[in-house]
Amino acid sequence: MSKVQDFSWSVVFAWVILMTFGLVAIYSATLGPVSQYLPGYIQDNFYKQGIFIVISIGVLIAFQFVSPRTFLDLSYLLYGIGILLMIITLLFGAEINGARSWLRFGPFNLQTSELMKIATILAAGNYLTSRRNITAENIRYATVAVIIILIPASLVLLQNDLGTTLIFLTLIPVMLFWSGLPYGVSIFMISPAIIAYLGLINVYYGVVAAIILTAVIFFIQKRVWLTVTSFITGIITIAGVQVALTQILKPHQIARISAFTNPSFDPTGAGWNVIQAKTAIGSGGLTGKGFMEGTQTQLKFLPEQWTDFIFCVIGEEFGFIGASILVLTFLFLFFRLLNIAGSHKHPFAQLVTVSITSVFFVHFFINVGSASALLPVIGLPLPFVSYGGSAFLTNTIMLAICLNMDFYKREFSIYR
């Protein structure tokens, strides 16, 4: 009985709530009155999601009978298999929405980059926790860990999936910071993302951010070489953003960024998504218009409303109350996972749990931020809510790993 009580049922409860939100929203977005505007394969999304949920439930249960040592012992093997699958996908995979990220298995598509997230976290976590002497002067081990993450990130980028590439890149500062990288170096590693974001809005914002972050890094770390490197990196980032906007990015990508900074510049084109998303969320009011009663959803004004903009469906049909319950459930899940990480004695379990939590959080932050026009539309699903069998299965496996290492933390703590 004590063993059953030790299981983190609150995490499972949060998972069930999010899954239920997703099923309800996907049903409304694909099988409600809007179905008359959708092709048959889109209308099947609800049933496909249901199949993957059943599979995921079985996987979640099965993982609780696996020794946590297995994840540590098989980490490098799983990483190698994942890289091989990524290469096969790049060469022979199916292209959907411009990204060659899927392997076809009959009526189902497997997004191999999703599974690669798990393998990368386990491999990098194994490497970093076996070498815990990372300092500002001795970053050789950190460099190897970065390479472990950059290899799959580069393959995902070659598959033309920018959103998933960002997920891999965010693992770098999270995993290194938790492994002992100094605060100043950690800020240096995330500074390009901050500078690039502000530089997209206005180049002068990017310059100011570069100066402020450089000053903060010097104040914390007091290393001249790091301070100079930080400032140079900031200037290169600003220049890189400008070059990307004028020379590298494709027209539709530039249009998305322009729509983020000024949705009204092309209200019938790139700005359409942002305008309709904000309209849907705003029209929901306090309690929403009701299940399958959202006009933006049911008249198909919202694009990709079963994936990228599913938060808008929930906001429109269930209002501020429904959207708040969803957000609070996510925050509760993040809090519980971080609490679980803090309770571990084994560094591998700590690092893996924190890294998985960061993946969930970045997905949540970018998806909700894009839907509410706080961020450019990047195209990342909302964990456990958006349609996507591979994503749901992968996220459930990651959650199952966290639950497993928490359930066996007393036994796992002896593997030091």
Image: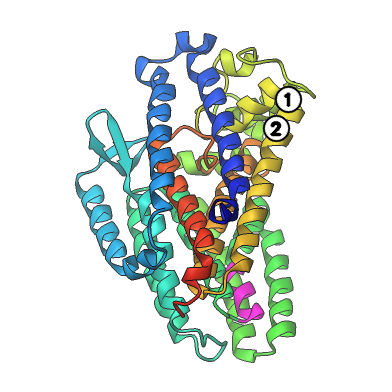
Q: Which residue is mark 1?
A: 319
Residue type of the residue flagged with mark 1:
Gly
Looking at the picture, tell me which residue is in the foreground, 61 or 44: 61
Majority secondary structure of magenta residues: helix
Picture quadrant of residue 54: top left
Residue 186 drawn in magenta: yes
94 w.r.t. 141: above or below: above
Depth order, front residue of 296/253:
296
Relative to 376, is 96 above or below?
above
Q: Residue at x 31, y 69 (%)?
A: 76
Q: Can you identify the residue that label 2 sits on?
A: 323
Q: Determine whether label 2 and label 1 are within 8 Å by CB.
A: yes
The three-letter code of the residue at mark 2 reads Ala
Which residue is drawn at the image coordinates 54% and 58% (left, top)? 241
**Cα separation between marks 2 and 1:** 6 Å
Residue nearer the viewer, 320 or 232? 320
Q: In the rendered structure, which segment of residues is drawn in magenta?
A: 182-191
Q: Position of residue 208 (x, y in %)?
A: 73, 66
The relative height of residue 163 versus residue 338 in the rendered view (above or below) is above
Helix, strand or loop at mark 1: helix
Give the residue at the far front of this rendering: 1
